[in-house]
């Protein structure tokens, strides 16, 4: 008697769980998610002597257990930090900024950009471009435009007691960006147009709209990140979106976009109420991680990935969720479909057996 009750009950439970798992996978199959391993790309950046990029990239992932607990990750990070803190390395980068006018390290950037903030830098660059013109060589019209704007901004900064200093800072950032070839084509075109207007009107009022977002970006993420984020924009609207994006993700913005093929911007806009830290965690699975976060929802996704145990309210629910996640990740869909069809066959058979008993009794009663 007990067996007759338990078998249908267990069969019903198995079918119910199978349907639940299949429905979950229909929404998003978390088995497709694989953590990004940052070690190979970090090692490649080190081989190319791009220690700043290597540090930025590995640091993005290092807080997550799957990377933090890997001894190789810790060793690479120590190697990078040791190299960047050495006297010889800093001295080389400082000279690089002065001689080449560009560097990937802050100390090199500082030496390169310092003169651009002063009037001497603008005069120097105008003289260089003038020499190119005199020798029938190619003239960098964007650099001429920026240097002209720089001179006007310097005069305006003195006249307005520093009120236009943000504009001057933005121009210095852009001159550096132009020198290291990180200005997008749309911005080069805009700068030429705005420089012409500023020259005619002797005013920087109109160009403020273009330069203010760049200054905000520079204040939030620094020069290196500003140029990396700026170079991928296609218009002014995208620049404004990047500024808003960076206000949420700070100096992680660039790698967040890089690891998700620039799709993080769209997903962040589509999920305005999702915590930034959870978007960053989802991005460790690449673009698919953000897709899963969007489809499943924040709480459901984080539970499924087992990253935030604090979302679970009781030990019982936590244990059930752990078991469910295990089944979701490990039981093949073919097995689940097999259980469903087996259950369907079982209950149909039971129904016909019951019908054979009930219908004759009803017929006897009728006659």
Image (cartoon, helix red, strand yellow):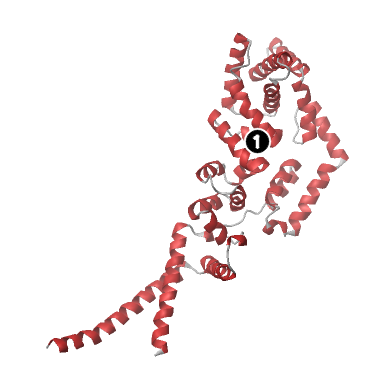
Q: Residue at x 50, y 69 (%)?
A: 331
Is the C terminus in the top left, top right, bottom left or bottom right quadrant?
Answer: bottom left
Where is residue 116 drawn, in percent x and y?
A: 75, 22
Residue 241 quadrant: top right
Q: Secondary structure at mark 1?
A: helix
Say if 130 sits above or below 114 in the image.
above
Is the N terminus in the top left, top right, bottom left or bottom right quadrant?
Answer: bottom left
Where is residue 165 drawn, in percent x and y?
A: 71, 22
Q: Is 86 situated left or right of 131 in this image?
A: right
Mark 1, Cα crowd under 10 Å, few <14 / some 14-19 / many 20+, is some
Judging depth in this view, the residue of 282 and 180 nearest the camera is 282
Where is residue 39 drawn, in percent x and y?
A: 70, 52
Count of numbered marks: 1
Asked if residue 235 shows in the view, the reply is no
Asked if residue 110 shows in the view, the reply is yes
Going by the picture, which residue comes out furthest to the front? 313
Q: Residue at x 59, y 23 (%)?
A: 209
Where is residue 35 drawn, in percent x and y?
A: 61, 56
Going by the picture, which residue comes out furthest to the right? 87
Q: Residue at x 80, y 28 (%)?
A: 111
Residue 220 quadrant: top right
Say if 30 sits above or below 151 in the image.
below
Residue 15 quadrant: bottom left
Say if 177 sits above or below 194 in the image.
below
Q: Dot 1 corresponds to which residue?
A: 228
Going by the picture, which residue comes out furthest to the left? 367
């Amino acid at each position: 008697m007990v067996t007759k009750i338990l078998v249908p009950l267990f069969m019903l439970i198995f079918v119910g769980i199978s349907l639940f798992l299949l429905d979950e996978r229909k929404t998003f199959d978390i088995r497709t998610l694989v953590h990004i391993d940052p070690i190979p790309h970090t090692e490649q950046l080190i081989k190319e002597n791009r220690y700043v990029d290597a540090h930025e990239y590995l640091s993005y992932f290092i807080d997550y257990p799957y990377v933090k607990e890997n001894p190789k990750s810790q060793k690479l990070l120590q190697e990078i930090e040791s190299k960047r803190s050495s006297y010889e390395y800093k001295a080389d980068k400082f000279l690089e900024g002065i001689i080449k006018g560009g560097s990937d390290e802050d100390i090199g950037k500082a030496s390169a950009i310092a003169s651009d903030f002063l009037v001497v830098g603008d005069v120097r660059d105008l003289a260089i471009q003038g020499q190119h013109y005199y020798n029938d060589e190619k003239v960098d019209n964007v650099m001429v435009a920026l240097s002209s704007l720089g001179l006007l901004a310097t005069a305006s900064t003195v006249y307005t007691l520093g009120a236009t200093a943000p504009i001057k800072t933005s121009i210095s950032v852009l001159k550096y960006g132009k020198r290291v070839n990180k200005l997008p084509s749309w911005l080069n075109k805009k700068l030429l147009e705005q420089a012409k207007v500023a020259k005619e009107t002797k005013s920087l009022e109109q160009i403020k709209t273009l330069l203010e977002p760049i200054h905000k970006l520079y204040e939030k993420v620094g020069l290196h990140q500003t140029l990396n984020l700026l170079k991928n924009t296609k218009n002014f609207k995208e620049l404004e979106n990047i500024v808003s994006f960076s206000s949420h993700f700070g100096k992680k913005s660039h790698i967040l976009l890089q690891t998700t093929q620039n799709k993080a911007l769209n997903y962040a806009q589509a999920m305005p109420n999702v915590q930034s830290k959870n978007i960053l965690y989802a991005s460790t699975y690449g673009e698919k991680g953000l897709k899963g976060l969007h489809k499943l929802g924040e709480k459901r996704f984080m539970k499924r990935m087992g990253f935030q145990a604090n979302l679970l309210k009781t030990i019982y629910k936590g244990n059930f969720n752990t078991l469910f996640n295990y089944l979701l990740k490990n039981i093949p869909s073919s097995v689940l479909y097999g259980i469903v069809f087996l259950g369907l066959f079982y209950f149909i058979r039971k129904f016909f057996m019951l019908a054979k008993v009930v219908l004759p009794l009803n017929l006897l009663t009728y006659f």
